[in-house]
Amino acid sequence: MPEKLLPFTKKQIDKIIDKYPTPFHIYDEKAIRKNARDFKKAFAWNKGFKEFFAVKACPNPYLIKMLHAEGFGTDCSSMAELILSQKTGIVGEEIMFSSNDTPAEEFVKAKKSKAIINLDDITHISYLEQHAGLPEIICLRYNPGPLKKGNIIIGHPEEAKYGFTRDQLFEGYRICRDKGIKRFGIHTMVASNELDPHYFVETAEILFKLIVELSHALNIRFEFANLSGGVGIPYRPEQERLDLQVMARGIREKYEQIIATNGLAPLKIFTESGRYITGPYGYLVSQVLHIKDTYKQFAGLDACMANLMRPALYGAYHHITVVGKENESRDFMYDVTGSLCENNDKFAIDRMLPKLTPGDIVVIHDAGAHGFAMGFNYNGKLRSAELLLREDGSVTQIRRAETVKDYLATLDFKRLATFTV
Ligand SMILES: *Cc1c(COP(=O)(O)O)cnc(C)c1O
């Protein structure tokens, strides 16, 4: 089986662990920047192309600042994400606010920030107007329903809670137009972790055709089509990367055929990728605490599903490298577990690995998106630190680890002392 590589040697990671105790997430700046540039380059044919990094995938302001320097904006869907963007110096139309079931104060905040607001439902037009006033530019989120096949994580579009139906979309833009809005965009997200580039070409085609119909029916002009995120990464070593060139070229062909020939160019292509941008370049680094030999062999780590929930949540595969044992044969089968009192707290089940002993450094790959971000405090587990491996090989801590004090910070023990039971 092909092996996934690490951006550090055993000697380097030993030194990092001396300073920053495991577990921690470490991100590879050089690889993220290169990937960001390649992503942008693939869409360079489209003037005005912009990627709005999905903050939920990896909500660290240091990484966001780095991506902003590469020309990316942010895709936010909560108050905290809007504030994170703002604190990172990203404001106005560099923010896409793609939320759903949205509370009024978040619309108010998004409107004040002059973010591009992407509405999830037809009733949100009047809700937004009532609470925040209508903005100058509006985007509506389309759910193609049975017209498009979904994939495993996101499910069938008609079962998904997101977006307007086709009829509602015509009605929604008409309402916005009649209320005086002049700038329009359209959005859809129908896949998650999809590795087939043609899937995104087909999605673009659906949106482009819809833009032709909407423009003609309502006499409005579209500024952008937001293809959102969902671009997959190869979690398994034997999987192939999605071919970005094939995807971007395919979208370009559809653009020429549908948008350009109908006189609707220029139209900006927007994306809201998260996973594809940082996913492969983040690693969860931990150590083996215990080896347990019962009905199975268990390797217990000092990390748990609070640091990376995907295996427990979706049964997702994450590749594991034992640092310093890369060249040993994988002759031993383990369940690799965390310490949470839930039996699904396993990073891997029946995984063939080299023989493990306590103290071994275990690196879990592809934890750079939807990894740290999904962390939680169930069972009193604490979120780990985040480190950045800089291009010059130095390491910067970009978020400290949580402490028990953080965990207890929302409780008032003074009041507890006088609370009679
Ligand atoms: C989650 C999400 C994204 C990012 O998805 P990835 O799989 O990380 O690319 C983008 N847009 C919206 C609206 C989302 O909910």
Image (spheres, rainbow, N blue to C red):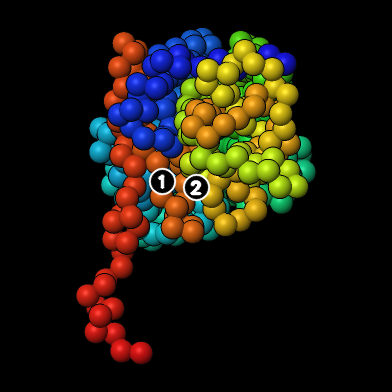
Which numbered tag is attached to residue 364?
none
- How far, Cα to Cα, is label 1 from label 2? 7 Å
Report if residue 84 is visible in the image. Answer: yes
Relative vertical location of residue 83 with respect to residue 255 in this rendering, above or below: below
* Element carrying mark 1: loop
> Dot 2: few (<14), some (14–19), or many (≥20) neighbours within 10 Å?
many
Which residue is label 2 attached to? Answer: 306
> Dot 1: few (<14), some (14–19), or many (≥20) neighbours within 10 Å?
many
Quadrant hosting residue 215? top right
Where residue 254 appears, as percent x and y from the top left, is 66, 17
Q: Disc 2 residue type?
A: Ala
**Left or right of 411: which side holds 161?**
right
Report if residue 209 is visible in the image. Answer: no
Relative vertical location of residue 416 with respect to residue 373 in this rendering, above or below: below
- Mark 1 close to ligand 1, CB under 8 Å: no
* Element carrying mark 2: loop
Where residue 175 appears, as percent x and y from the top left, is 51, 50
**Left or right of 72: which side holds 400?**
left
The residue under the point 40% across, 41% down is 384
Quadrant hosting residue 351? top right
Q: Earlier in the sequence, mark 1 or mark 2?
A: 2
Residues at discs 1 and 2 in contact (Cβ within 8 Å):
yes
The residue under the point 26% across, 72% down is 413
Which residue is label 1 attached to? Answer: 383
**Left or right of 414: which side holds 289?**
right
Relative vertical location of residue 56 with respect to residue 416 in this rendering, above or below: above
Q: Disc 1 residue type?
A: Arg
